[in-house]
Amino acid sequence: MDCIFCKIVAGEIPSTKVYEDDTVLAFKDLNPTAPVHILVIPKTHIASAADIDESNSAVIAHIFEVAAVIAKEQGLDDGFRIVNNCGELGGQTVKHLHFHLLGGRKFDWPAG
Ligand code: 5GP
Ligand code: ZN
């Protein structure tokens, strides 16, 4: 499958890893939009948030546990933002489910 995040999981494309276990990988975004910009992904290929169902949702819960640990490690004690872009209108560019963990600055709401 021609998926850049599967290739990152497989080690075929280099990345700056910040966390890894059996089911989840977290690595720095190539084009950060905040002082802390980390992508947290399931190692298994799930195309988008629209493809989460009861067969694969356990890893999503685990992703949020991992994100909380990483946020503490990164010193984001005053808050952070977790973003998922889903599908074309949601602005998803990489078709492997990922959550952006953003921190180190103030974020506007509503997002544009
Ligand atoms: P999306 O727009 O799909 O929510 O986010 C995709 C993110 O993946 C973007 O923030 C982009 O900078 C990041 N990205 C795309 N290709 C690579 C890559 O090869 N390595 C890393 N570390 N990040 C990437
Ligand atoms: Zn993939």
Image (tube, rainbow, N blue to C red):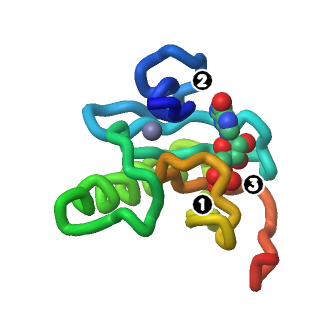
Pinpoint residue 35: horizontal percent, then vertical percent. 78, 46
Quarter holding the N terminus?
top left
**Nearest to N terminus: mark 1 or mark 3:** 1
Give the secondary structure at mark 2: loop
Quarter holding the C terminus?
bottom right
Q: Is residue 70 left or right of residue 109?
A: left
Disc sitting over residue 15 in the figure = 2
How many marks are shown on the rendered structure?
Answer: 3
Pinpoint residue 77: horizontal percent, then vertical percent. 60, 60
Give the secondary structure at mark 1: loop
Q: Looking at the rendering, which quadrant does residue 6 occupy?
A: top left
Name the residue: 51% across, 34% down: 3
Pinpoint residue 92: horizontal percent, then vertical percent. 64, 58
* Residue underneath mark 3: 104
Disc sitting over residue 77 in the figure = 1
Name the residue: 38% across, 53% down: 63
In this picture, is 8 found above or below 71? Answer: above
Residue type indicated by callout 3: Gly
Residue type indicated by callout 2: Ser
Pinpoint residue 16: horizontal percent, then vertical percent. 60, 24
Q: Which quadrant of the frame does ligand 1 lie within? A: top right
Tell me if mark 2 has few (under 14), some (14-19) or many (20+) residues whose alpha carbon lies within 10 angstroms of its own.
Answer: some
In front: mark 1 or mark 2? 2
Q: Is residue 37 visible in the rendered structure shown here?
A: no
Q: In the rendered structure, are the residues bearing label 1 and label 2 in contact, judged by CB atoms less than 8 Å apart?
A: no
In this picture, is 24 found above or below 98? Answer: above
Relative depth, front residue between 80 and 3: 3
Taking the view exactly as shown, the residue that stands out farthest to the front is 1
Relative depth, front residue between 37 and 69: 37
Q: Is residue 68 left or right of residue 89?
A: left
Name the residue: 31% across, 32% down: 21
